[in-house]
Image (spheres, grey):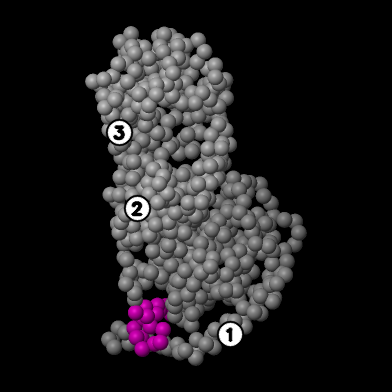
């Protein structure tokens, strides 16, 4: 044994199997006693509430997630972070009523594999040993520090017997916990909302108060147990030793570090099957990565869900949920707001189902935008780097643009149809702010994230022979409107321009503004065949306020048909494309006159 190892073990008492058995028996007795004492003495478990009523920051605690960079500790560091993700779910956005006692274990519950907890490090008999739920003390430390700064009364607190590297124990601002006999309990004199979030590299815990809240008039009951005495000034604790890196190799607890994938896995949790995203995932993934998709399109013979699943270590699907979602969407296809709300609810269920693929060793994620706010709200993305595959504008920006259009055109009532719940909009905005990379082919979306957007090339469809320029016979004044016929797609602007220029319009989508919307204009029936409408079109027009998938426009550009659209359609300037501002019928008419040589 080296000199440094001898110095490390100086004054160290080696744990034995017998001492470990005695410890377990004592702990079991204390757990039984605490359970009996608390059987009717604590308030019910707190439930999440709306954050909007709590806007005053009372206190904040920040602590690093990755406190031990040694290779031998990497697996348990990942386990600790996974446990913090799981526990923070039960803590985030809960409200502690004024005068009531908060109990860590009452709120978090027992850490078990069945509830999603994994092995991390736990301090036991002076050693950092593997244990299910290990690492939760970082959360109790943060709670204790935030409670002190917020002026809460500490009812019960126990300090660590050793200093855990990277923790608040060295400052005496720690609070150890062990189910259920070592607890952290405190009460506040005003209602407090607790916010627990995991960033990429740190745990952030905040206490938020409401505006104008006053302490309750009634007297506060005495503590149920005395707080632990503060450590005397100048007295330092020994540092806890990990059983994987301790110099005492003869100890029965000494571990041989397992082989570890240092760089971690990436989970691809996908939904919208865009060709641009299929190509990206196929290029970017590694063999150890995992894939989560709604269902396996090859197995079910459904082209819509045909992702390339080769080269992934694990594949997860949700076929029953996906088929139910498709049935519901078809049933609600003519119910705009109801259909959108159903889609949001289905995305939440799919996100919950696929989140089981986010194991402790998943260090990065690439997630579909539809799943993003739900995974963020559940805490599944905390402690991970993640990229977002974006198919539409962020909900906050989408609603801002539609609100502006509705204010300018109050008679177009369906411009205000889509309004997502405030919590969902907020969750998406927070997640997009935390994302490392935004991946999209949509030019308008990419421009919102100039510093972190990865802009993919739009997939240009192969030009079919039937629609090639050699056989096209366009009608001089016929324009195709991909639709559907609704205000946010620019139907009103096209109608006004068509009247001014005496154009013939071929609408392709559903007439959501009413059967008589195009009354007074020359209408052309949609030509038979998937692309036959291109053969007779002098131009394709989409003056939309918002547009997610400009696939008909891309098909027209690939065929050589002129396209007149707004920047909201997401196609960057290129030959054959004329861009006009959204909501400007006069500018649209001028552009069409130039394109059609009128």
Rendered image: mark on residue 461: 3
Question: x, y (%) of residue 128?
Answer: 44, 77
Q: Residue furthest bottom?
A: 18
Q: CA distance from mark 1 to mark 2?
A: 51 Å
Q: Residue at x 54, y 85 (%)?
A: 23
Whether residue 143 can be seen here: yes
Question: x, y (%) of residue 372?
Answer: 46, 48
Crowding near pointer 3: few (<14 within 10 Å), some, many (20+)? some
Residue 220 within the magenta-colored segment of the rendering: no
Mark 1 or mark 2, earlier in chain = 1
Q: Which mark lies nearer to you, 3 or 1? A: 3
Residue 318 vs residue 554: left or right? right
Residue 563 vs residue 190: left or right? left
Q: Residue at x 39, y 24 (%)?
A: 528
Q: Tell me the quarter of the picture where residue 583 sits.
A: top left
Q: Look at the image and tell me in which quarter the C terminus lies.
A: top left
Q: Are marks 3 and 2 in contact (CB under 8 Å)?
A: no
Mark 3 or mark 2, earlier in chain = 2
Q: What residue did someone put label 1 on?
A: 26
Q: Look at the image and tell me in which quarter the N terminus lies.
A: bottom left
As helix, strand or loop, the secondary structure at mark 2 comes to loop
Magenta stretch secondary structure, dominant:
loop
Q: What residue did someone put label 2 on?
A: 309
């Amino acid at each position: 044994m080296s000199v440094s190892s001898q110095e490390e073990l100086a004054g160290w008492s080696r744990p034995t199997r017998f001492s470990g058995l005695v410890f377990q028996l004592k702990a079991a007795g204390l757990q039984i006693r605490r359970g009996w004492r608390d059987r009717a003495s604590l308030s019910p478990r707190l439930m999440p509430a709306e954050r909007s009523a709590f806007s005053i920051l009372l206190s904040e605690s920040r602590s690093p997630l990755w406190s031990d960079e040694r290779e031998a500790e990497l697996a348990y560091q990942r386990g600790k972070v996974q446990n913090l993700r799981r526990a923070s779910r039960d803590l985030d956005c809960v409200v502690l009523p004024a005068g009531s006692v908060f109990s860590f274990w009452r709120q978090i519950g027992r850490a078990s594999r069945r509830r999603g907890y994994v092995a991390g490090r736990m301090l036991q008999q002076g050693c950092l040993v593997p244990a299910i739920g290990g690492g939760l003390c970082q959360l109790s430390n943060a709670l204790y520090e935030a409670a002190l700064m917020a002026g809460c009364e500490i009812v019960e607190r126990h300090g660590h017997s050793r200093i855990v590297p990277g923790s608040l124990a060295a400052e005496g601002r720690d609070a150890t916990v062990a189910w259920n006999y070592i607890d952290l309990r405190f009460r506040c004199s005003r209602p407090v909302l607790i916010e627990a979030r995991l960033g990429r590299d740190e745990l952030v815990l905040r206490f938020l108060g409401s505006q104008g809240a006053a302490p309750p008039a009634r007297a506060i009951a005495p503590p149920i147990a005395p707080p632990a005495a503060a450590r005397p000034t100048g007295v330092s604790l020994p540092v806890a030793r990990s059983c994987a890196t301790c110099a005492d190799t003869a100890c029965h607890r000494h571990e041989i570090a397992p082989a570890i994938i240092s760089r971690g896995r990436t989970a691809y949790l996908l939904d919208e099957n865009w060709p641009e995203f299929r190509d990206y995932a196929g290029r970017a993934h590694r063999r150890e990565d995992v894939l989560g998709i709604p269902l396996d399109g090859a197995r079910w013979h459904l082209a819509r869900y045909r992702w390339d699943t080769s080269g992934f270590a694990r594949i997860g699907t949700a076929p029953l949920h996906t088929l139910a979602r498709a049935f519901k969407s078809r049933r609600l296809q003519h119910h705009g707001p109801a259909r959108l709300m159903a889609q949001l609810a289905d995305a939440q269920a799919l996100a919950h189902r696929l989140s089981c693929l986010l194991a402790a060793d998943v260090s990065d994620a690439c997630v579909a935008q539809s799943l993003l706010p739900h995974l963020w709200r559940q805490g599944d993305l905390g402690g991970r780097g993640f990229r977002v595959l974006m198919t539409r504008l962020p909900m906050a920006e989408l609603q801002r643009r539609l609100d502006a259009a509705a204010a300018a055109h109050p008679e177009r009532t369906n411009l205000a149809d889509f309004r997502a719940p405030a919590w969902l909009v907020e969750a998406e905005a927070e997640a997009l702010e935390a994302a490392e990379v935004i991946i999209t082919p949509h030019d308008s979306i990419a421009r919102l994230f100039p510093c972190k957007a990865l802009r993919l090339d739009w997939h240009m469809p192969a030009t079919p022979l039937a629609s090639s320029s050699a056989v096209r016979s366009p009608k001089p004044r016929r324009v195709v409107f991909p639709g559907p016929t609704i205000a946010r797609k620019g139907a009103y602007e096209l109608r006004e321009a068509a009247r001014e220029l005496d154009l013939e319009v071929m609408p392709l989508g559903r007439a959501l503004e009413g059967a008589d919307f195009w009354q007074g204009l020359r209408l052309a029936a949609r030509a038979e065949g998937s692309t036959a409408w291109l053969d007779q079109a002098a131009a394709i027009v989409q003056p939309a306020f918002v547009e997610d998938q400009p696939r008909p426009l891309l098909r027209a550009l690939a065929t050589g048909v002129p396209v007149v659209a707004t920047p909201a359609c997401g196609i960057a300037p290129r030959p054959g494309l004329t861009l006009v501002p959204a909501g400007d019928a006069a500018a649209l008419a001028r552009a069409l006159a130039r394109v059609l040589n009128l």
